Image (cartoon, helix red, strand yellow):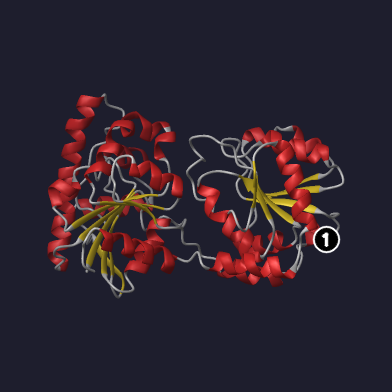
Amino acid sequence: MDIVITGQQAWDVEIGSNCKNIALEFARNHRVLYVNSPLDRISLLRNGSDPKIAKRRDVVRGRADGIEKVGENLWILYPDRMIESVNWLPGFLFDILNKYNNRTFAGSIARATSRLGFENYIHFNDNDMFRSFYLKDLLKPRLSIYYSRDYMLAVDYWKKHGVRLEPELIAKSDLCVANSTYLAQYCGKYNKHSYYVGQGCDLDIFMEGAESSEPADLEKIRRPRIGYVGALQTLRLDMELLDYIARKRPEWTLVLVGPEDNEFMQSDLHKLPNVIFTGSRNISELPAYINAFDVCLNPQLLNEVTIGNYPRKIDEYLAVGKPVVATSTDAMSVFSEHVYLGNGKDDYIRLIERALAEQSAEKTADRRQFASSHTWENSVAEIYKAISKTGFAL
């Protein structure tokens, strides 16, 4: 089986992504062409000296080959044509130029698939609702799959045209798969062939984290330690809740590990003696911090940005074996047997107290076992099951 992947995450961007991990898993058994987003005119004008932009410019100008083989069954495509930057345009002009962009993009893909001998392929679209909107019509893949991993319409850039286009794209796709139950239900409003396929995580260093020694900067920090690891962003985290927990239980130490946005940096949390900010830490250090906590938190705000997202940090906490208190959402329902879920300030206090009281080796082992099931292999296996439900023979 041949698979063509388009999406938002370029292969040469250093941070990881769901789509890159899925591509690697697909490539264990199938030939995969991973298509980077095409170079757009504004990016070329603004960031022409960036080595990544320069590479794409060289491909467009015919100075470099746009196809790179990076694995036995995996190729990366740098499209050989440039597209226009159109998101700022009003609806009718956007539609005209977006269709032109799609044709340009489809042409690059068609030339690459012809060269590689890809035939009757599956098109897997990772949340790319604009550049890939017409690809089913233009490329005529054997099967078109839309992958929803974030509620993109909560972001202004995507909302402007996405509120109209994403439902149409979901509806005309042959199949939709999502990494959270909330997003599967959202897709299901427009396409009856919509399925939750879970989330894969790279948990090896966290599974080994239960043996980590205590970080030096926490050695003298009193217990119980209630900790959070991740970006400290007021768009996603309930800062008032954290303040309430610290003031209500001054005998607890609240440890916050990660970079802060301006609101967090200016907050009164920095004035509280039982709140510790460690700043950013390398990912290799995070298991040791989690292991040094008595209870881990995910004090998530409930808003459009967060409500549908799969919280990968929960798996990281559980992989170390730690009890977790988190905000209850639809996406968190899959964790209900292993995480203390609540809403509101007093709920959090009660559940943290309960988590501290119910520590046991058996619960630790259960958490680690549950987290270990959230692999990319298992998530992609669920994608294959969803494909089979459409009648497509793998």
Q: Position of residue 219 (x, y in %)?
A: 83, 60
* Drawn side of residue 255 relative to residue 314, left or right: right
- Identify the element where label 1 is drawn: loop
Please tell me which residue is depicted at 76% across the width and 57% down the height of the picture: 294
Q: Which residue is mark 1?
A: 219
- The N terminus sits in image quarter: bottom left
Residue 16 seen in this snapshot: yes
Q: Amino acid at mark 1?
A: Glu
- The C terminus sits in image quarter: bottom left
Please tell me which residue is depicted at 20% across the width and 26% down the height of the picture: 93
Of residues 3 and 66, the one nearer the viewer is 3
Rendered image quadrant of residue 220: bottom right
Q: Is residue 295 above or below residue 373?
A: above
Q: Position of residue 299 (x, y in %)?
A: 64, 43
Of residues 153 and 271, the one nearer the viewer is 153
Of residues 339 and 242, the one nearer the viewer is 339
* Drawn side of residue 23 relative to residue 103, left or right: right
